Amino acid sequence: MLICVTNRKLCTGDFIVKLSEISYKADAVILREKDLTEEQYTELAAKCIDAGIYSRTKFVANKYINSAKKLGIKDIQLSLCDFKKYSDELDFFDSKWVSVHSVDEACEAQRMGADYLIAGHIFRTECKKDLEPRGLKFLKSVCKSVRCPVLAIGGINKDNICDVINAGAAGACVMSGFMKGQYN
């Protein structure tokens, strides 16, 4: 699986046009715009739906469960903290994608019903330049500890994507490569 994680600030060109192009190539698009308020996020997600992105690939909302429900987005990506916080409000969703940063977190998220785990960050990345990457050994440990699909995130590119697959990941989440046009 090749997943696009959005960051419109990294996007070259028009963001909605770029996502429309990506929606033909990625197995899923996670709309992850952390700087937006819920109202702004809802407006942007609605524009993505209007552009047909939701009809061409799995379209995953991030963080704002009420926004996702309002727009009929049936897949949600949450931090483990938010996954626990909203656990009683997630029956609406077909799939729940949960970010994890340790084997213990991965096991906990799986026990709680996560459908996909996003493990990271694996390699150095500009998004987390002050934090040491967890590496392939960490990824392999997470993959061996759970049954649900694990997706690697953090510094994934065309040169190292095979390494994360070889470590046991079901796929990778890519931000810069998609937003800057390297996967288009």
Image (tube, rainbow, N blue to C red):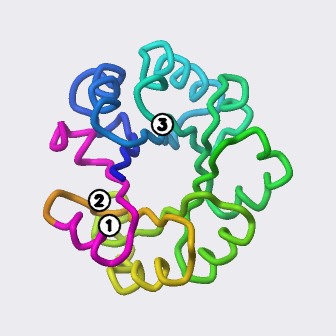
Query: Looking at this rendering, what residue extends furthest in the right direction?
Result: 88
| Real-space CA distance between mark 3 and mark 1, rounded to the nearest whole angstrom | 29 Å
Query: In the image, 138: left or right of 165?
Result: right
| Real-space CA distance between mark 2 and mark 3, rounded to the nearest whole angstrom | 26 Å
First to last magenta residue range: 160-184
Q: Which residue is mark 1?
A: 129
Q: Is residue 176 highlighted in magenta?
A: yes
Residue at 33% x, 25% y is: 15
At mark 2, the secondary structure is helix
Residue at 36% x, 34% y is: 8
| Real-space CA distance between mark 1 and mark 2, rounded to the nearest whole angstrom | 5 Å
Task: Please tell me in which quadrant of the rendered image residue 165 appears.
Answer: bottom left
At mark 3, the secondary structure is strand
Q: Residues within 10 Å of mark 2 (few under 14, many from 20)?
A: few
Q: Which residue is mark 3?
A: 58
Q: Out of 49 and 165, give the one closest to the viewer.
A: 165
Q: Earlier in the sequence, mark 3 or mark 1?
A: 3
Query: Looking at this rendering, what residue extends furthest in the front direction?
Result: 147
For the residues bearing labels 1 and 2, Cβ distance under 8 angstroms: yes
